[in-house]
Amino acid sequence: MIQLVSITKAFGERTLLDDVSWQISGRECVGLCGPNGAGKTTLLRILAGFEETDKGNILKSSSLTVGYLPQDGLIHTGRTLQAEASSAFQPLLDLKAEMHVLEKQLGASGTDDKEHVRQLARYSELQDAFRNQDGYTIDLRVATVLQGLGFHQSEFDCLTETFSGGWQMRIALAKLLLGRPNLLLLDEPTNHLDLEARNWLENYLSAYPHAIILVSHDRFFLDAVVTRITEVGLKTLTDYTGTYTNYLKAHDERMQRLREAKRRQDEEIARIQQFVDRFRYQATKASQVQSRLKTLAKISPIEIPPERKRLHFSFPPCPPSGRIAFELKSARKAYGKTTVLEDVGLHIERGDRIALVGPNGAGKSTLMRLLAGIEPPDTGERIEGYRLVMQYFAQDEPSRLDASSSVYETLASGSPSQMVPAIRNILGGFLFSADDVYKPVSVLSGGERTRLAVARMLLHPANTLLLDEPTNHLDIDSKDVLLDALLNFGGTLLFVSHDRYFVDRLATKIIEVGNGQVRTYPGTYKEFIWRKEHPESTEGSISTAGNRQAALSETKNSETSTSPILGRAAHSASRRRNAEIRRKARAAKAREARITALEVQIASREQEIKAIEASMATPGFYDDREAARTVIDQHQSLMWEVGDLMNRWEQLQNSDPDATTE
């Protein structure tokens, strides 16, 4: 389909590709990987014809059609959304327009028979071509793709200039997908997509009938779509068959082999050089020295990429919050006539790791701002838990950085003194190395600002984090640094991310935001998707109440198995001592009875909570708001009661048995 033959591409003194040959054919889907600046975007632009090579040739089949989606910068104006998307079928639309002209001519009087026959023949020819190319399904295909990418039917008649930059890129992507070029080139196609749109795009590209080459920092997306990974680096292209996960393993094995070969080569060069240095000036060894010098000249040094250190980072210590982190009660938020959240009740406990999901515009960021206290609810209330220390990372956090400060100064300013030695390591983990740390913020790109803002967040102690799309513009390595830190974070976490791998690894509870309401799903994102696809089934759901009961039972079993057996001491010489032992035994028995009674109460209340949560997860629960509010209030009341019972249980467990009386 397309083949690169001995191409070379350089920018000034920096060579990105050197004498590279490579090809793609059939229905392959190739993911381009490699460090930032290696040349992934340059390669896409070369294949798209927007960039010239310095040397070499590009061979293409005569029938090849190429579609290219850049990372950003595309703007559409002057047409409605539907008309702009339909322009992907321009040849078919031209056929349709000609058919309409012929229809008018055929209906007109005064046309001679010969011309009438010619018009009929042409109309029949056009109609057959239009039907064979599925022209009658254009509207259906356009609607399917637009809705898959997150547009609503009500927006189809809106002018394209009314859409923001991210939605402009969705329009461009929709046109490419509808046009179905033989070679589809996508540079970060998921940058502006929410999780629902990404899931749809994965399925669409998996069934795409032609070749695809894409760049993405979303490893889940790569695993779901690609059939081959091509690594861009060391001025060449290296192919790995299979998914991104397979690539990681094969790449590590290849690097180990390269390092071993490099070690052996260096040893051989050193041995030859040692011989030359020793006998260079001895006439009897002159021929041998010259032979070895020629051998050295013929050796091509093995190049290996510098090994990037894997940064492991821990948040600075912070005292834990109380058991309840946040609560929203009957919260409502509207902007003008648009109601974003209506009568929202939310209960977030210490240690929760919650992902907020829902389509763009559903209200995820609004909910984040309410929880962070940035905006108050119009009605209802926000209740903040005891000893809460919070950090909030907003979508526009990068734009809030002081443009006059340097990269290093941005992190050093306000950081705890014990974290200052870690600043350079943190910056290195987010791709700021060497002199980059002295750059002023004003010259950083959007992606660099995002990386810097995330790095700054990691340096401040907190027991509760609210993160609104912290993974935007982060490459895979930077996401891994952030992910590892958050996995080891012991506090409460709420976050929005459109990276499926990030959400899958991190979230233990999902909150779906949409239609003014929020719904809580215990479990991972994968379990959330399954429950959405099987709404009739409630089996397999995991409630925090059930987890607490399991932990409670485990703690009790552990305690009872290690508690001393109280009994009468053998050969007691004192009745007073016997009386004391009996008193302690009665006290311990009474304490155990009270603990058991509390456990029974807690288990009973948690069964009620579980039943209520199951009913809250059923479709249509919120249709009757008054009935729903009654159930939600009952749920909150039971949660508070369980909290009180748990506190009493913990006090008894930690109390001195001797202090317990009947």
Image (tube, rainbow, N blue to C red):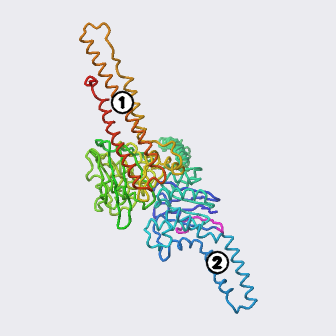
Residue type indicated by callout 1: Ala
Q: Is residue 20 left or right of residue 597?
A: right
Lower position in the chain sequence, tag 2 or tag 1: 2
Q: Which residue occupies the foreground of this view, 127 or 399?
A: 127
Residue 68: percent from left, percent from top: 54, 66
Q: Which residue occupies the foreground of this view, 339 or 122?
A: 339
Residue 458: percent from left, percent from top: 34, 49
Q: Which residues are magenta?
A: 47-63
Cα distance in 3D space between marks 2 and 1? 80 Å
Tell me, yes or no, if residue 15 can be seen here.
Answer: yes
Mark toward the viewer: 2 or 1: 1
Q: In the drawing, what numbered circle is on residue 269?
A: none
Instruction: Please say whether residue 48 is one of the residues in the magenta stretch.
Output: yes
Q: Is residue 598 left or right of residue 126?
A: left
Is 559 rendered above or below residue 17?
A: above
Is 259 rendered above or below residue 228?
A: above
